[in-house]
Amino acid sequence: MEENKNPDRNELGFSDGLPYGDPSPKKRFKKRSGANELSIEDLAKGVRTGDRGLLARAITLIESNAEHHFQKGQQLLQKLLPDSGKSIRIGITGVPGAGKSTFIEAFGTYLCEQGYRVAVLAVDPSSSISGGSILGDKTRMGELANNPRAFIRPSPSEGKLGGVHRKTRETMLVCEAAGFDVILIETVGVGQSEVVVRNMVDFFMLVVLTGAGDELQGMKKGIMELADAIVVNKADGNNKPLAEKTREEYKRIVHFLQPYTKGWPTQVTTCSALYYEGIDGVWKIINDFEKQTKQSGVFDARRRIQTKEWMYSMIVDQLQASFFHHPNVKLLLPKLENEVITGDRTVTSAVESLFKAYLG
Ligand code: GDP
């Protein structure tokens, strides 16, 4: 696993979120790159040939919050784009404790054994709050992390101005260019991140617990409506009959829901991630899904829509960055923020002033 030894430094030798206007970013880039400066072409070549060190550096470049890295990252992406798109992209969600990471460990290991190369990424809505990340814990997915066919990347740090979703999507494309056949994107089943991940992947699965009477009631129907499959985990030992019962309950419910993918009724299955049972069944469902949706054209149509949506979200990202980095806005914002908080100014008036300052 491309573990970053020093959490304050990324592989390029930069601290994450390097402030704009750092006096010598290029120098440091060169310094860490050895005698010859590592060009975008070199990085792209390294990624394509599956060099894990260079893959990690390429992703770090894309994840960087520094403005000059953004341009380089986009150049790199442009070069790699023709080699991307060939994987199956799978999103995995579920409440904390449902067994997502145990499942990914088992599923990823199974896929590696089948000869696939697997990349695991994460979208973690809590990392900016907790300072941690769902894949940050080194003890998680230990076996998969050590598998030479697998690549695990913790969620990118949020950065002040967001963009974490862009980073995950672009990291996925880089991993595809590096030859990974299966991309697994994990997200915690809370908040908005499921929708974001749903919009990045081909297939979306919800991992749930057995004995989910309470969970069924508490679970947002909305998340179930996003899923192509619901996987009842922990179907082992004494829990097995309960898992079967839970599966039947979910089956009854999804019957009344509109399937997210046209022509694909949401599948419900059981597995034991801990004992590696039913993992092949999940893969079979995904294979059937891929085959069927490719035949019907739904697969490609979805990817095209996702690319279009990506463009729009990038416009919003860039507008936001351009606004908040504008010197006039930077100057005015703290004062106006304070006036709004103390009630000396209305929000509308503050926003109006900021836009005037932004537009010159
Ligand atoms: P996550 O928060 O969704 O990533 O859940 P984890 O993968 O960390 O699992 C939470 C707990 O459930 C851990 O103690 C796991 O060992 C346990 N667990 C996960 N999968 C299974 C399973 O299939 N069977 C049993 N019995 N326990 C499991």
Image (cartoon, rainbow, N blue to C red):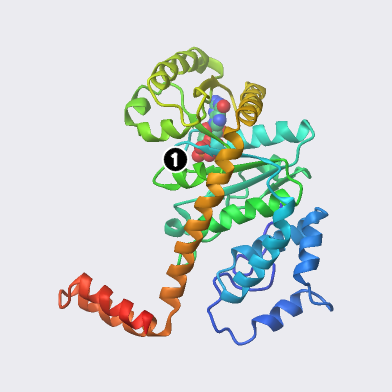
- The reply to whether residue 216 is in sight is yes
The location of residue 34, given as percent across then percent down, is 81, 75
Comparing 45 with 26, the one in front is: 45
Amino acid type of the residue that numbered disc 1 sits on in the rendered structure = Gly
Q: From what the image shows, is residue 35 above or below residue 170?
A: below
The residue lying furthest to the left in this view is 344
Quarter in which the C terminus is drawn: bottom left
Residue shown at the point (46%, 71%) measured from the top left: 321
- The reply to whether residue 133 is in sight is no
The location of residue 266, given as percent across then percent down, is 49, 24
> Mark 1 near ligand 1 (CB under 8 Å)?
no
Comparing 263 with 73, the one in front is: 263
Residue shown at the point (69%, 70%) measured from the top left: 12
The location of residue 75, given as percent across then percent down, is 68, 67
Q: Seen in the image, is 174 located left or right of residue 305?
A: right
Residue density around tag 1, few if under 14, some if 14–19, many if 20 or more, within 10 Å? many
Residue shown at the point (41%, 26%) measured from the top left: 258
Q: Quadrant of residue 81?
A: bottom right
Q: Quadrant of residue 52?
A: bottom right
Q: From what the image shows, is residue 75 above or below residue 274?
A: below
Residue assigned mark 1: 189
Comparing 246 with 62, the one in front is: 62
SS of the residue under disc 1: loop
Quarter of the image where ligand 1 sits: top right
Q: Quadrant of residue 72?
A: bottom right
